[in-house]
Structures are given as C-alpha cells and as structure tokens.
Image (cartoon, rainbow, N blue to C red):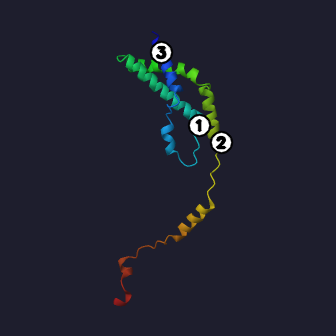
Amino acid sequence: MDREGDIVRHVYAALEDEFAQPLEALVGDLPEGFDSFSELEISLSEWSYGYGVAWALVRSREPFLSSSRVAELAAQAVTTAWRTFSEESWRSLIAQDREMAATPRAEPERAPQLDQFMGGLSRARPARRPRASSDETADPDSA
C-alpha cells in the first residue's frame, strides 16, 4: 500500500470538499466595509487546513514518529496535493496581495443623516465646567 499517496489523496479530497471552509466561521465577524478575504488569505487558510489534515493522518498512522518527521511528511503530502488543487503559484498570490494592499481603498461614503446626527449629538453635550474649590463655594455674604 502506498501510504504517502494515500495521504495525498485524502488531503486533496479534504481540500476539494465544499463543506470544508476554514474561513466560513469568521464571516459573521467581518468589520463593516470588508467585502471578502483576498485570494492569498483564502489560499493560506486552505493550505493550513490541508496541512492539518495531513499532519493528523500521518500522526494517527505512525503514532511513534518524531514530531519533526510527522511535520516533514505532512508538508510533503500537502505540497503534492496543493499542486493539483490550486492553479496559482504562491509567488503570484503574494504578488497580487501586495499589489492590492498598496492600492489605496476609497473611504466608504457616510450617510449625510449620520453626519448630521453626530454633529447634533456633539452640540447636545453639556459643557463641563471645572469644579470650584471649597473656598469659592462659600457664600460671600455669610462671612
């Protein structure tokens, strides 16, 4: 039995599984104005997921291997599976991500009503006066 090929096939199947979406749990916590994850972020997430699957498979099949050997075999398996799974090279994904990061994003437009509300709110705050000392609070006529 080809153990390494078997692990690669399992990793590839995990990467292809449409229900294995590592970033899906984060979608509800995205900040306002954040449209989506970059291709690099998605790919890194998927690669890390594949590495975890490979690591778990190697460890479960060979429980007495050293951690460094498990990591080495897992890296080999995910690298092989990744070549079939992804069409883009890491170099191009990183270059695209850096190019997008260098491009300034347009500030989202704020609704005029929000600006008016915030302006009105700032004017509605009472002005803070400094506290008077105990000598200043005494009634001048009582002396």
Give the residue type that dot 2 points to. Answer: Thr
Say if residue 121 shows up in the picture: yes
Q: Nearer the viewer, mark 1 or mark 2?
A: 1
The foreground one among 99 and 115 is: 115
Measuring from the top left, give residue 83's x and y in whole percent: 57, 21
Q: Secondary structure at mark 1?
A: loop
- Return the residue at label 2: 103
Q: How far apart, in angstroms, are the residues tagged by discs 1 and 2?
A: 13 Å
Measuring from the top left, give residue 70's x and y in whole percent: 42, 19
* x 49%, y 14%: residue: 5
- Return the residue at label 1: 38
Q: How far apart, in angstroms, are the residues tagged by discs 1 and 3?
A: 31 Å
Give the residue type that dot 1 points to. Answer: Ser
Image quarter of the C terminus = bottom left
Labels 1 and 2 touching (C-beta < 8 A)? no
* x 56%, y 68%: residue: 120
Mark 3 or mark 2: which comes first in sequence?
3
Q: How far apart, in angstroms, are the residues tagged by discs 3 and 2?
A: 43 Å
Please determine whether, in this image, residue 85 is positioned above or below residue 1: below
Circle 3 packing at 10 Å, graded few (<14), some (14-19), many (20+), is few
Please determine whether, in this image, residue 56 is positioned above or below residue 130: above
Q: Secondary structure at mark 2?
A: loop
- Return the residue at label 3: 6
Give the residue type that dot 3 points to. Answer: Asp
Please determine whether, in this image, residue 74 is positioned above or below residue 107: above
Q: Nearer the viewer, mark 1 or mark 3?
A: 3
Circle 1 packing at 10 Å, graded few (<14), some (14-19), many (20+), is some
Measuring from the top left, give residue 113's x and y in whole percent: 60, 63
Say if residue 143 shows up in the picture: no
* x 59%, y 27%: residue: 90
